[in-house]
Image (cartoon, grey):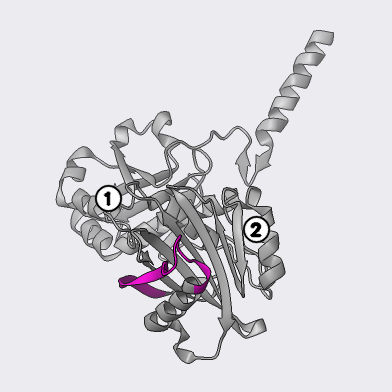
């Protein structure tokens, strides 16, 4: 009888554990596989080699903007639907090509953590190959942004658990804002309305900058104004090793656009920086936001120095930090919303 009671107890515990959820998932959900910015495409081989498949490949293979050398947006893997088994189903990023005449029009749908966690699956539905191809080409940026934001949200979740608390505390005391930066950025320098945190490495060096200035000009959110302001701030605060050396913006390689951060307006700039009178340089990305409660602009920026190495992943890691900026009058909210054109569906 004791053995029967023990077995029943074990079964009850197992049933309880199987029913337990964390973030809506069973505790037994496997960890997802694949590297950051790697996408698995579930597609018939013949379709992948035809124009319909080439259209999707060309989207995923686009160069990352703002880098000094060519780097594609994603690492691409494929698998045929009949081989899409347990091994492949735990990939972190999946696109399912779903072309059937039961659909009346093309559509994006997505689901989270279906077979593993963290995981995002995008299903691209279309009634035929022609409409699929046209839809993918027309909405190429939607696809890119969807998976980039998904990866950045994972990075933000990691930062929530593990970020440099000393740097965050110093930023809080100087600017009365919250922001999370990677824990590796453990060296920092303070100036007037300015802080620079860095890994201080000879290569693969990651840097985060925050500075503020009064909001007095309607032309603040223009490319010219941003470059001039950035150059004036960096010249003072980030000098080179010798006199006459200082950080400057490469004006020929800067792109700007309006973005939405935490439901409010933001201004994004990305491009290249260089050290005047020196050979150093690299990419940067910056967000400028209006702190209405204090009548000022807050700029957060990530830049790297990583000569002769790939830069995509560490730049996107720093970019994720920019989205964690929480102004003094904002409610805590760090996840980057997905595009309205992509509809969430319940897990299958």
Q: Secondary structure at mark 2?
A: helix
Residue extent of the magenta highlight:
236-257
Tag in front: 2 or 1 = 2
Residue appearing at x 72%, y 68% in the figure: 173
Badge count: 2
Whether residue 247 is in magenta: the answer is yes
Residue appearing at x 42%, y 61% in the figure: 342
- Measured as percent of width and height from the top left, residue 130 is found at 18, 58
Question: Is residue 267 left or right of 48 when viewed as pictured?
Answer: right
Q: Is residue 185 visible?
A: yes
Question: Is residue 93 left or right of 208 when viewed as pictured?
Answer: left
For marks 2 and 1, the one nearer the N-term is: 1
- Measured as percent of width and height from the top left, residue 234 is found at 48, 71
Asked if residue 136 is positioned above or below residue 24 in the image, the reply reads: below
Residue appearing at x 24%, y 61% in the figure: 137
Crowding at label 1, few (<14), some or many (≥20) Cα neighbours within 10 Å?
Answer: few
Residue named by callout 1: 100
Q: Secondary structure at mark 1?
A: loop
- Measured as percent of width and height from the top left, residue 272 is found at 35, 65
Crowding at label 2, few (<14), some or many (≥20) Cα neighbours within 10 Å?
Answer: many
Whether residue 168 is in magenta: the answer is no
Q: Quadrant of the N terminus?
A: top right
Residue named by callout 2: 167
Residue appearing at x 27%, y 42% in the figure: 43
Identify the residue at the far front of this view: 243
Q: 212 or 145, which is in the foreground?
A: 212
Gap between marks 2 and 1, in whole Å? Answer: 53 Å
Asked if residue 160 is positioned above or below residue 32 in the image, the reply reads: below
């Amino acid at each position: 009888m004791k053995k029967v009671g023990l077995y029943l107890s074990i079964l009850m515990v197992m049933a309880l554990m199987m029913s337990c959820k964390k973030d809506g998932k069973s505790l037994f959900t496997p960890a997802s596989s694949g590297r950051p910015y790697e996408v698995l495409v579930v597609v018939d081989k013949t379709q992948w080699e035809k124009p319909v498949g080439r259209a999707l490949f060309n989207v995923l293979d686009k160069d990352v903007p703002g880098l000094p050398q060519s780097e594609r947006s994603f690492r691409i893997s494929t698998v045929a639907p009949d081989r899409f088994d347990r091994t492949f189903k735990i990939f972190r990023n999946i696109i399912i090509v779903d072309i059937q005449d039961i659909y009346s029009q093309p559509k994006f749908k997505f689901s989270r953590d279906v077979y593993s966690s963290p995981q995002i699956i995008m299903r691209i539905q279309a009634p035929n190959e022609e409409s699929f191809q046209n839809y993918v080409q027309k909405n190429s940026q939607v696809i890119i942004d969807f998976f980039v934001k998904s990866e950045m949200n994972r990075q933000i979740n990691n930062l929530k658990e593990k970020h440099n608390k000393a740097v965050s505390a110093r930023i809080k005391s100087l600017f009365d804002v919250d922001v999370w930066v990677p824990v590796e950025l453990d060296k920092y320098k303070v100036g007037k309305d300015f802080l620079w945190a860095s890994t201080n490495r000879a290569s693969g060096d990651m840097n985060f900058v925050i500075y503020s200035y009064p909001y007095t000009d309607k032309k603040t959110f223009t490319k010219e104004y941003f470059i001039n302001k950035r150059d004036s701030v960096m010249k003072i605060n980030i000098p080179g090793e010798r006199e006459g050396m200082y950080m400057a913006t490469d004006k020929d390689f800067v792109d700007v656009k309006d973005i939405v951060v935490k439901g409010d307006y933001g201004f994004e700039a990305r491009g290249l920086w260089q050290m005047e009178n020196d050979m150093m340089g690299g990419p940067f990305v910056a967000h400028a936001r209006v702190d209405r409660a204090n009548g000022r602009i807050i700029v957060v920026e990530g830049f790297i120095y990583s000569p002769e190495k790939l830069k995509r992943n560490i730049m996107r890691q720093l970019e994720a930090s920019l989205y964690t900026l929480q102004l003094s009058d904002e409610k805590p909210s760090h996840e980057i919303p997905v595009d309205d054109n992509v509809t969430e569906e319940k897990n299958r």
